[in-house]
Amino acid sequence: MITISHVYYAYETGTPYLLRDLNLTIHNGDYISIVGENGSGKSTFIKLLLGLLKPSRGTLVNDFKRTSYVPQRFETLNRQFPITVREVMNTYRKVLGIKDKEAVSHYLGLMKMDAYGESLIGNLSGGQCQKVFIARALMAHPDLLILDEPSTGIDVKSQAELYPFLKQLNTEHGITIVTVEHNLRAAMRNSQYMYHVAGGSGHLCSPDEYIREYVSENTGSESYV
Ligand SMILES: Nc1ncnc2c1ncn2[C@@H]1O[C@H](COP(=O)(O)OP(=O)(O)OP(=O)(O)O)[C@@H](O)[C@H]1O
């Protein structure tokens, strides 16, 4: 469970808060999509969840045992660095203290990326790279998986595989999922809740409520969902 109570955040002291008075409980087994306009603070919010940023005010308590993070594509990747997919996975396996070398093939296989083990990571397409990041995150056996826009750069066919897979991780393996999501159709299908970040505030609602209250109101239509 993560308990967020009256959390405020500003990148620089003395500047206006980017996020104000956030209150949210993330329960074990939840699937929550964080939605909102560009620049509203969604990535900042997940960095707070991850403990990469500390609230300026308020408290955030994360009781999950193992939190894995799939960053936005290329955010953490030096594409010039000559390292293969298998080496990336193996390095992380060692960091995690997993002795079984087969774990690398297993998790690459899960994401249908086993054929790319010897490819240089910098030569992969965006979507392929994203799948490697997800395989890497799953190797940690997370009870909480946090993703930042997982479908960025992933083609429609791969998205059609990715989202049911994420849903399966949630429903069958009990992994709690929190994801920043611009793909509203996927968010509608997969999530129990949407967390709408707007004007510095956060509002938890059902996917239906989100479409009714925000999307239809702003676009006059649901046609693009
Ligand atoms: N390290 C930083 N220092 C100062 N300001 C930052 C920093 N990172 C982000 N910001 C600012 O905080 C605001 C929110 O950024 P954030 O990346 O959290 O938004 P977002 O909702 O995830 O956007 P998008 O949908 O475009 O990814 C933006 O105005 C951004 O410029």
Image (tube, grey):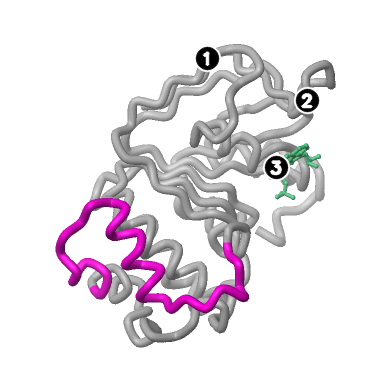
> Which region is colored magenta?
77-105
**Numbered mark located on residue 12 in the image:** 2
Q: Is residue 168 visible?
A: no
Q: Quadrant of ligand 1?
A: top right
Mark in the foreground, 3 or 2: 2
Task: Please state which amino acid type lies under the numbered disc 3.
Answer: Gly
Q: Secondary structure at mark 1?
A: strand
Identify the residue at horizontal 41%, vertical 76% (top origin).
85
Identify the residue at horizontal 63%, vertical 13% (top origin).
57
Q: Is mark 3 within 8 Å of ligand 1?
A: yes
Q: Check if residue 85 falls in the magenta segment.
A: yes
Label 3 to label 1: alpha-carbon separation? 23 Å
The answer to whether 36 is drawn above or below residue 108 in the figure is: above
Residue marked by disc 3: 36
* Mark 2 neighbour density, 10 Å: few (under 14) some (14–19) many (20 or more): few
Mark 3 or 1, nearer chain start? 3
